[in-house]
Image: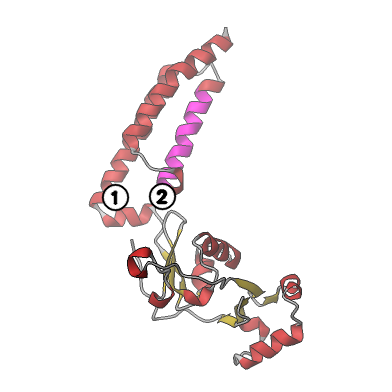
Amino acid sequence: MDGVKVILRIVTILPFMLAIVLYMGKRSIGELPVFDFLVILVFGAVVGADIADPKINHIHTVIAMIAIALLQKLIINLKLKHQKVGKLLTFEPTVVMYKGEFLKENMGQIKYSIDNILQMLREKNVFHTPDVELAIVESNGKLSVKLYPDKESVVREDLSIYKTGNNFEIPVVLDGKIQRDLLQRLDKSESWLMEQLESAGELSLSSVFYAGVNARNEFIISRKQPMRSDVPPFKH
């Protein structure tokens, strides 16, 4: 009997759940701010408990779902009307790269490692860090990247040609630590690396946040440094 009740609950709850979600607003999970994501988690927990435990009064679940949807709609309206409310409930955009250099302090504030940023850059087809004029981790966790104008890809509307070249970059130093396996794959020695650092005016490995070598054998370095005052602010 309980099995039949569970099946009936699934049949009745899914259309109602769909209607509630559509009422709350259509956005992909990857674009949800933190508050909306928490609402979805609570919503799923309420529905899951109702389906898993036939002893729970079905009408209580329906009331809870309606209450969650109304609360979410109320908060969204408050966020639209009052900017301060929006700032309290969402993360502010964070600049993680500026003028080709990583901003370690900003990355630490949002708990992003250099590996996270490098992966997100590759997902944006950016393999050469000095090409990046500005990189921002948005409130939904995605990375927005602005390249220097002369590094942007040529499109058909420009000259009817495609940009060519394989200017990818291999990291050899991450947060002051030598990536020996990658250095070995490049057929480079640690003494070569130290010579490159010295040529760049950097004698201490511990003060190097990132160093890489691109396909043209060019050496790229980003130093650990205090908070920069010239980084453009982003609040929304």
Camera-side mark, 1 or 2: 2
Q: Are marks 1 and 2 in contact (CB under 8 Å)?
A: no
Give the side of residue 78 with respect to residue 100, left or right: left
The residue at the far left in this view is: 81
- 10 Å crowding of disc 1: few (<14), some (14-19), many (20+): some
Label 1 belongs to which residue? 79
Report x, y in % for residue 67: 35, 31
Label 2 belongs to which residue? 33
Look at the picture and state if 121 lies above or below 65.
below
Q: For the point 51% across and 63% down, which residue is it?
A: 125
Report x, y in % for residue 144: 42, 63
Q: If the image is split into quadrants, where does the N terminus sit?
A: top right
Of 56 and 153, the residue lying toward us: 153
Q: For the point 36% across and 55% down, which residue is it?
A: 88
Please state the extent of the stretch shown in magenta in the rendering.
35-50
Report x, y in % for residue 138: 42, 59
- The circle drawn on residue 143 is none
Coloring scheme used: secondary structure
Look at the picture and state if 130 lies above or below 195.
above
Residue 179 in view in this figure: yes
**Image quadrant of residue 133?**
bottom left
Report x, y in % for residue 61: 43, 23
Give the side of residue 185 with respect to residue 157, left or right: right
The residue at the far top in this view is: 1
**Image quadrant of residue 202?**
bottom right
